[in-house]
């Protein structure tokens, strides 16, 4: 298959894919991969296969094609192709929750001296790296990466990238419990979709609606949360987007749990867990198990709650997800206090505070914890964040956290 025929078949696959005929599109692209003698065409078709498998939640296949794409890029000896293939390798590992590998591949991308084209990919690289740091609960570095990605988006007038970054920032602020910002950023993403997204994939609308639903639930606006989640789920079902379906089912379950309707929540947690297990979203599984634990606690089934905690703890330790571990220690603390088991209670109190210290989840001005309850936060240019009220009250002549880090021990 020559260059022109390769191009023609790739376009045919794209047309099928955009018409929701995914399996037919995959067959066309696989045929191109087997028969084409054009390395640049093979590179492009591998990109199509990587994107399609990502959206279907077939992350192991996504990774497999990303590895083949790197070999093709090396064959082409083109720095732009190589940067793009390393980004796809990073994204595949991010989806499989291999966060240290993601960061490593992202750094490889950023160190490559390519042309203007690969420089434009740096925004996507920074976003992927930020998501990986967030998965590891390294909040300052995550925020630094997201802000860098946002600057790239603004400088290149890349509205799609800006939309994706806004969704990640919504997730970031949900985790550290500034729910106003957790809602503001996905609302901004939804605005971008309305203003610029006429020719975009519907996944951008679905993604912003899902993150809005999460924030609305956290704010106690359960009817709004349900509306947004239903819209997101409708698009996810239409497009066979398994990863988003799993997240929506988790959000539905959390909404029902917030209404104390445990019987309706449980089957939705089960369905979400089934898809998350199938696609390999271990970070999502931790969230499902946290929800299931809270349901058992509502029903005062404390031993069953501890069983769910044990499974979640194994996942969180395996991923290095420190925030997940902190939440689990907090739940154990409540359970063992109810059971009046003092030794176990003390153990989890100590571990909880160790997690807080390790993640630096406290305000460098007042010393109180961050992420314990809904609080307005403000980041400084260094990406350290503080209670907004502390910054307004005390002002700042530089960052107190950075000052502490730069103090070197003197000689006595």
Image (cartoon, grey):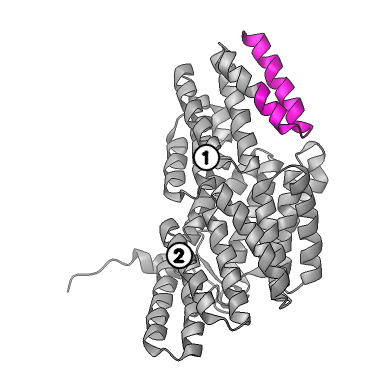
Q: Is residue 25 on the magenta stretch?
A: yes
At 75% from the left and 57% from the top, the residue drawn is 187
The residue at which mark 2 appears reads as: 322
Query: Where residue 60 is drawn, which disc sits there?
Result: 1
Q: Name, please, the residue furthest toward the top.
A: 2
Dominant secondary structure (helix, strand or loop) of the stretch shown in magenta:
helix
C-alpha separation, residue under disc 2 versus residue under disc 1:
25 Å
On the question of residue 398 being in view, the answer is no
**Residue 385 image offset from top left, x and y in percent:** 53, 67
Question: Residue placed at 54% from the left, 78% from the top?
Answer: 394
Q: Seen in the image, is 385 located left or right of residue 10?
A: left
Whether residue 173 is in magenta: the answer is no
Q: Are marks 2 and 1 in contact (CB under 8 Å)?
A: no
The answer to whether 317 is drawn above or below residue 277 in the figure is below
Give the magenta range: 1-28
- Local secondary structure at mark 2: helix
Q: Position of residue 51 (x, y in %)?
A: 62, 35
The residue sitting at 71% across, 32% down in the picture is: 22
For this view, does 287 lie left or right of residue 239? left
**398 left or right, relative to 295:** left
Q: Nearer the viewer, residue 303 or 92?
A: 303
Outermost left residue: 412
| Residue 367 in the image, given as x and y percentages of width and height | 47, 79
């Amino acid at each position: 298959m020559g260059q022109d025929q390769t191009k023609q078949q790739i376009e045919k696959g794209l047309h099928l894919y955009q018409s929701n005929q995914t399996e037919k599109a995959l067959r066309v692209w696989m045929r191109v991969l087997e028969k084409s003698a054009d390395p640049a065409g093979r590179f492009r078709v591998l990109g199509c296969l990587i994107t399609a498998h990502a959206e279907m939640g077939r992350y192991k296949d996504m990774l497999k094609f990303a590895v083949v794409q790197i070999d093709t890029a090396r064959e082409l000896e083109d720095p732009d192709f190589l940067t793009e293939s390393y980004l796809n390798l990073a994204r595949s590992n991010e989806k499989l929750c291999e966060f240290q590998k993601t960061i490593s591949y992202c750094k490889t991308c950023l160190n490559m001296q390519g042309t203007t084209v690969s420089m434009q990919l740096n925004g996507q690289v920074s976003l992927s790296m930020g998501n990986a740091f967030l998965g590891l609960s390294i909040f300052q570095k995550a925020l630094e990466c997201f802000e860098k990605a946002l600057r790239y988006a603004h400088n290149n007038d890349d509205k799609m990238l800006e939309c994706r970054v806004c969704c990640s920032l919504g997730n970031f602020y949900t985790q550290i419990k500034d729910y106003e910002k957790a809602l503001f950023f996905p609302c901004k993403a939804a605005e971008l979709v309305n203003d610029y997204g006429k020719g975009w994939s519907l996944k951008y609308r679905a993604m912003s609606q899902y993150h809005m639903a999460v924030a609305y639930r956290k704010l106690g606006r359960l009817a709004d949360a349900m509306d947004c989640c239903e819209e997101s789920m409708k698009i996810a079902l239409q497009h066979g987007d398994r990863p988003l379906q799993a997240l929506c089912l988790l959000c539905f379950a959390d909404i029902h749990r917030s209404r104390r309707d445990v019987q309706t929540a449980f089957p939705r947690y089960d369905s979400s867990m089934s898809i998350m297990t199938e696609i390999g979203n271990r970070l999502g599984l931790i969230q499902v198990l946290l929800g299931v634990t809270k349901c058992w606690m509502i029903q005062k089934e404390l031993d069953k709650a501890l069983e769910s905690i044990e499974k979640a703890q194994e996942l969180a330790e395996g991923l290095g997800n420190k925030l997940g571990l902190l939440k689990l220690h907090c739940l154990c603390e409540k359970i063992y206090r109810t059971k009046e088991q003092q030794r176990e209670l003390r153990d989890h109190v100590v571990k909880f505070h160790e997690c807080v210290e390790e993640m630096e989840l406290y305000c460098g001005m007042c010393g109180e914890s961050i992420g314990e309850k809904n609080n307005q936060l403000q980041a400084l240019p260094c990406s350290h964040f503080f209670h907004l009220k502390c910054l307004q009250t005390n002002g700042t002549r530089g960052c107190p956290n950075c000052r502490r880090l730069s103090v070197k021990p003197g000689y006595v």
